[in-house]
């Protein structure tokens, strides 16, 4: 399992890196969760553009953050060859897109982009979904994967030549599961 800090061993390019960092706020193996406590997380969320500086998180905001994080994780698991997200996993993403407005902007060079209208937690989470949309369009989304270790599911960016990466870290998750499979084959 990678370090719980903000240093990723296999970081995605920006702005997809923000999506990766957000999903990885939960370390499933150690059960450490950056979103478990409103007071302790506001600074991290503000630093990653998910909360205005000095804003106070409500319990409803925390519930939304956790639900959207797990919806995004379900998308990445599917992206890694796992099952398609079920309706329950997608529901927070549907609620978000139904409630947070976006606008189309045209830059000075003629570049067109879609951006959230406001700065609430929901608006900023919509910004993450827009980063996913852009990554799907430019092909980088296909390289954002969840570790195949079901106990881990750490999100990593696959930079391997054939884009066949499976583990967040071969030395830990890869070896652990390969040894488990080897022992199971020897028993049978």
Image (spheres, grey):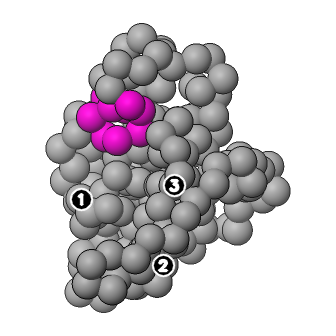
Using a 10 Å C-alpha cutoff, classify the residue at mark 3 as few (fewer than 14 neighbours), some (14 to 19) or many (20 or more).
Answer: many
100 lies left or right of 40: right
**Residue in the image at 51% along x and 71% along y:** 104
Residue at which label 3 appears: 116
- Relative to 188, does residue 19 appear above or below in the rendering? above
> What is the distance, in whole Å, between disc 3 and disc 1 at their CAs?
25 Å
> What is the distance, in whole Å, between disc 3 and disc 2 at their CAs?
18 Å
Nearer the observer: mark 3 or 2; the answer is 3
Q: Secondary structure at mark 2?
A: helix
Question: Which stretch is magenta?
Answer: 44-52
**Residue in the image at 40% along x and 49% along y:** 154
Q: Secondary structure at mark 3?
A: strand
Q: Are marks 2 and 1 in contact (CB under 8 Å)?
A: no
Nearer the observer: mark 3 or 1; the answer is 3
- Residue 136's tag is 2
Q: Is residue 80 visible?
A: no
Q: Nearer the N terminus, badge 3 or badge 2?
A: 3
**Residue in the image at 32% along x and 75% along y:** 107
Q: Position of residue 69 (x, y in %)?
A: 55, 44
Q: Nearer the N terminus, badge 3 or badge 1?
A: 1
Q: Secondary structure at mark 1?
A: loop
**Residue in the image at 58% along x and 41% along y:** 122
Residue at which label 1 appears: 11
Q: Nearer the N terminus, badge 2 or badge 1?
A: 1
Q: Position of residue 2 (x, y in %)?
A: 26, 43
């Amino acid at each position: 399992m990678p370090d719980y800090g903000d240093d990723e061993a296999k970081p995605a390019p920006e702005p997809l890196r923000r999506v990766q960092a957000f999903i990885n706020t939960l370390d499933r193996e150690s059960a450490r969760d950056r979103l478990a406590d409103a007071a302790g997380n506001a600074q991290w969320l503000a630093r990653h553009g998910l909360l205005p500086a000095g804003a106070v998180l409500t319990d409803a905001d925390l519930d939304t953050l956790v639900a959207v994080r797990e919806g995004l994780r379900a998308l990445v698991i599917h992206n890694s060859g796992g099952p398609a997200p079920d309706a329950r996993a997608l529901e927070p993403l549907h609620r978000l897109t139904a409630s947070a407005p976006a606008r189309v902007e045209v830059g000075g060079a003629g570049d067109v982009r879609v951006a959230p209208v406001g700065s609430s937690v929901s608006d900023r989470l919509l910004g993450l979904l827009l980063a996913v949309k852009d990554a799907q369009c430019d092909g980088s989304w296909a390289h954002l994967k969840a570790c195949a270790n079901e106990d881990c599911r750490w999100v990593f960016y696959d930079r391997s030549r054939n884009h066949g990466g499976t583990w967040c870290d071969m030395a830990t998750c890869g070896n652990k599961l390969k040894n488990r499979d080897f022992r199971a084959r020897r028993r049978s």
